[in-house]
Amino acid sequence: MELLNNFLASDELEMFITGPAGSGKTTLLHKLVTRLVELNINFLVVAYTHKAKDVLIKKLPEGTPVRTLHSWLKKRPGINQKAKHISALMVNKQMGRPEPLQVLIVDEFSFVGEKDYFSIGELQDELELEGTGAKPIKVIYSGDLNQLSPVNDVQVILPHKPYWIQLTEIHRTTTTISKPLGELVEMIEGKREPHYLEPTPHFIRGVDLLTKYLEDPEEDKAMFAYTNRAVQTYNALVQGYSEPKPGDSLYSTTLKETFRLSHIETEYYGVCFTPNGPIDSTTKYNLLGFLISKEYIKFFIMDSGLVIPGIFGSYNNKVIRERLGKALVEANKKELESKHLYREYKTVNEFVSQLDFTHCATIHTSQGSEYKNVYIDSQDLAFCRDTHEQMKLLYVGMSRAKELIYLSN
């Protein structure tokens, strides 16, 4: 804890903790949090996703304040109505000023892109410029240098001394997973030439993923693929059918929750649950009527009573949203009237959830989660044309496992 004490007493604003999966980052965070409480420091721990936040809540001392980064920054997704390129459609809007802190702990900083990093920096600068005597927020960044970069953004956080704790030894598991994981880390870091990872008793290669997954009685398991097409295909194959039925468990990557389905309606005029709060037939701009008019949107009534406007199937969702986004972008490029296209894209983006069966997910959405047994479609990784990124994808998938890893080749 001496380094933490020195950091708090210094003029430096950033401290870093880095290490591969299983190297003890969360254990160290537990100790840091305990020390901050002892010192009566006003602090907050933030994660980038709700799933990662939930994992932290379980692992850190009871009562530790944990939120998502965007909820603290008071940012929410928005849409650039005049975008002329698909990558410029989504923007984050500042909806208020974050509450003051002495220390902010950012877990899994590889998720944090340029805009969010600069937002944190701007808050640090503002306190100095205000001349109130308040000290700028000190930030502790914890993460894995080998994780995937932020989606549609660049990774800008570069750890540096003097306040940098580098963890190198993997102790998450006593199984033989650590051997291939360690080799893969060295390949990603350029310390070894890329080579075939030999199987071990807990790192099994060349399996029929579907058969093995179905035979596995373990409930704490997950399957990962690179593409949404593969995810939807595996989910349907494991489930035994492609369309959901009453009683099925469905996971929403939009809402980050699992639900049990009661039934599905093509029209619904009561209160609906959306990523941006409830809507009904009295909501401004007739949002509900607009959603009802779109045949690709269904109303999923859950056992809990929630009604969710949604698109079922990871790939179906991707195709529909890309089609809407491209139509808006193309109209803007040609300087055509695009208000109706903007309305549809905005409404779907803000009020429609993605749903699928619970068995398989993309590797990108797996970050921050842990499972006893993990199944990875390594052949699907070939759709990622960057060899170095392929290795990072494999690493992220493998590092979700606590006991067993199964690869398709």
Image (cartoon, rainbow, N blue to C red):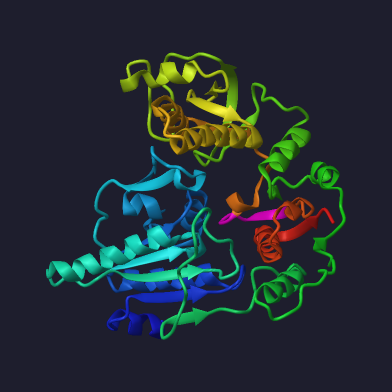
**The N terminus is located in which quarter?**
bottom left
The magenta span reads 367-374
Q: Is residue 406 above or below residue 326?
A: below
Magenta stretch: includes residue 241 = no
Q: Is residue 59 above or below residue 306?
A: below
| 371 in the magenta segment | yes
User: Toward the viewer: 196 or 203?
Assistant: 196
From the image, which quarter does the C terminus lie in?
A: bottom right
Residue found at x 76% / y 55%: 382
Picture quarter containing residue 405?
Answer: bottom right
Between 316 and 214, the residue placed more toward the observer is 316
Q: Which residue sits at x=44%, y=44%?
A: 90
Q: Residue at x 75, y 68 (%)?
A: 175
Q: Residue at x 57, y 33 (%)?
A: 323
Q: Position of residue 138 (x, y in %)?
A: 31, 72
- Residue 28 image position (x, y, % from top left): 49, 73
Q: In this picture, is 402 found above or below 226? A: below
- Can residue 42 be seen here? The reply is no
Q: How many marks?
A: 0
- Outermost front residue: 334
